[in-house]
Image (cartoon, grey):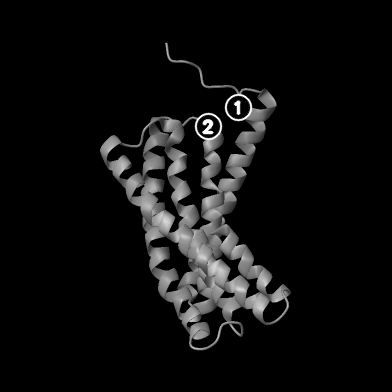
Amino acid sequence: MVSAANGALLVPHLPAGQARLDMVVACYAMFGASLLATLIILPQLWSRLVVHGVGAARMVPTLWIVLGPLGQSITAAHLLARSADGVLPEPYAAGAQMLAVLYGVPAMGFALLWLTLAAAITIRTARAGLPFSLTWWSFTFPVGTLVTGVSGLAARSGSAMLATLAVLLYGLLLASWAAVATRTARGARHGHLFLPPAAPR
């Protein structure tokens, strides 16, 4: 999905004509492959969460990784629609514009549902004790993809509500980066961050 989004950004820099068309088609193929893989994996994650619970406290932040493919797919759909304009023939170029919104908004809804679930589990675990580990970086990059996705939807639709949501998510992203980067630097300075967890007695 990252390749699909980055490929879309390269389209305007390619020679006009067949090269741009081929790049857009290839990016949509990568978009589809990644989306299908996500749709296969997500039900398995949900089933494991329901049947086996959240697992070890230090692994709870990894629940946020689900936001990665969701947010990145919204971003990719937006960027691909932008790059398809003037490259794909009609009605496919117009269809790409519609797909960016008709796919992006429902995917955003599911991403926000998962964000709420992951946040609730994280807060509950933190109250019982959430030890810092490198898995905390899961709070940053996946949220970043949601920020870019919602920002694209806001720009495309002109929705003030989506623009506000993008700003709020960006605030969450900045707070996450600040907290995780600070804890990582502190742990690296003391040297204990990269040691294996102590064996239970």
**Viewed as shown, does residue 175 lie left or right of 20?**
left
Question: Height in image: 90 above or below 179?
Answer: below
**Viewed as shown, does residue 172 lie left or right of 110?**
right
The residue positioned 65% from the left and 69% from the top of the image is: 9
Type of amino acid at the residue the image marks with label 2: Phe
Q: Which mark is residue 132?
A: 2
Residue most extreme to the left: 51
The residue positioned 57% from the left and 58% from the top of the image is: 2
Q: Residue 157 location in percent, x, y?
A: 49, 79
Disc 1 element = loop
The residue positioned 45% from the left and 76% from the top of the image is: 99
| Label 2 neighbour load within 10 Å: few <14, some 14-19, many 20+ | some
Q: Residue 138 location in percent, x, y?
A: 52, 44
Q: Dividing the picture into quarters, in which one does residue 82 lie?
A: bottom right
Residue most extreme to the top: 201
Type of amino acid at the residue the image marks with label 1: Leu
Disc 2 element = loop
Q: Residue 46 location in percent, x, y?
A: 32, 47
Q: Dividing the picture into quarters, in which one does residue 80 lie?
A: bottom right
Residue contact between numbered discs 1 and 2, judged by CB atoms under 8 Å: yes
The residue labelled by disc 1 is 193
**Residue 116 seen in render:** no
First in sequence: mark 1 or mark 2? 2
The residue positioned 60% from the left and 35% from the top of the image is: 183
Q: Nearer the viewer, residue 133 or 23?
A: 23
Q: Residue 90 location in percent, x, y?
A: 52, 89
Q: Nearer the viewer, residue 8 or 89?
A: 89
| Quadrant containing the C terminus in the rendered view | top left
| Label 1 neighbour load within 10 Å: few <14, some 14-19, many 20+ | some
Whole-Å distance between the Cαs marked 1 and 2?
A: 8 Å
